[in-house]
Image: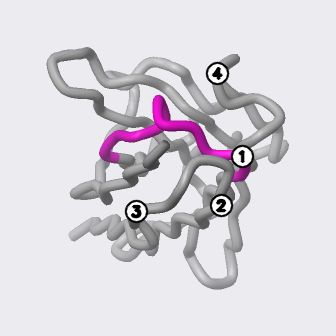
Amino acid sequence: QVQLVESGGSRVQAGGSLRLSCAASGLTFSSYAMAWFRDFPEKEREFVAAMSWTTGRTYYADSVKGRFTISRDNAKNTLYLQMNSLKPEDTAVYFCAAQFGGAGSVTSWEYDHWGQGTQVTVSS
């Protein structure tokens, strides 16, 4: 059974940093593109960042480019999201997602597995 478990969410002041982790089990991690999405109240799930399973190429939403960095450690089956220069508008529930054999899509429906989410709150 595939499991994705996010951690690292917290409350932080604007301008601060957080690192989210996503521990994966029950899958061949290196065969999956991985991504981070986030949920805002009463809005559609929003793409944040993704990484291809083959090339390691990364993709970012314009709103986080230059502030967030996605990375993965295939040996540890773990995905990371380093978030710097956080803003109040980054407040959301953050989810990691896995896409078998994917290139790192920006659309949520292309992902096969999801974690339960971790709350990030940025206060001004």
Decide: marks 1, 2 in contact (CB < 8 A)?
yes
Residue at (69, 64) in percent of width and height: 72
- Counting residues from the start of the chain, the first of labels 4 and 3 encountered is 3
**Is residue 53 part of the magenta span, yes or no?**
no
Kindly check if marks 4 and 1 are in contact, taking CB atoms under 8 A apart as contact. no
Q: Earlier in the sequence, mark 2 or mark 4?
A: 2
x then y, percent, for residue 47: 49, 26
Q: Residues within 10 Å of mark 3 (few under 14, many from 20)?
A: some
Whole-number angstrom distance, CA of label 2 to CA of label 4: 16 Å
Q: Between tags 4 and 3, which lies in front?
A: 3
Residue at label 4? 63
Secondary structure, mark 3, is strand
Q: From the image, tell me which residue sits under label 3.
A: 11
Q: Residue at x 34, y 65 (%)?
A: 4
| Residue range corresponding to the magenta coloring | 84-93
Which three-letter amino acid code belongs to the residue tagged 1?
Ser
Q: Is residue 87 magenta?
A: yes
CA gap, disc 4 to disc 3? Answer: 20 Å
**Real-space Cα separation, disc 1 to disc 2, in angstroms:** 6 Å
Q: Which residue is mark 2?
A: 17
Amino acid type, mark 2: Ser
Displayed quadrant of residue 91: top left
Q: Position of residue 43 (x, y in %)?
A: 24, 16
Mark in the foreground, 2 or 4: 2
Q: Which residue is mark 1?
A: 85
- Mark 4 is surrounded, within 10 Å at the Cα level, by few (under 14), some (14 to 19) or many (20 or more) other residues, namely few
Query: Residue sitting at 29 percent across and 49 percent down?
Result: 114
Q: Amino acid at mark 4?
A: Ser
Q: Considering the numbered disc 1 on the image, is that residue within a helix, a strand or a loop? A: loop
Q: Nearer the viewer, residue 64 or 15?
A: 15
How packed mark 1 is, by other alpha carbons closer than 10 Å (few <14, some 14-19, many 20 or more), is: some
Mark 2 or 3, nearer chain start: 3
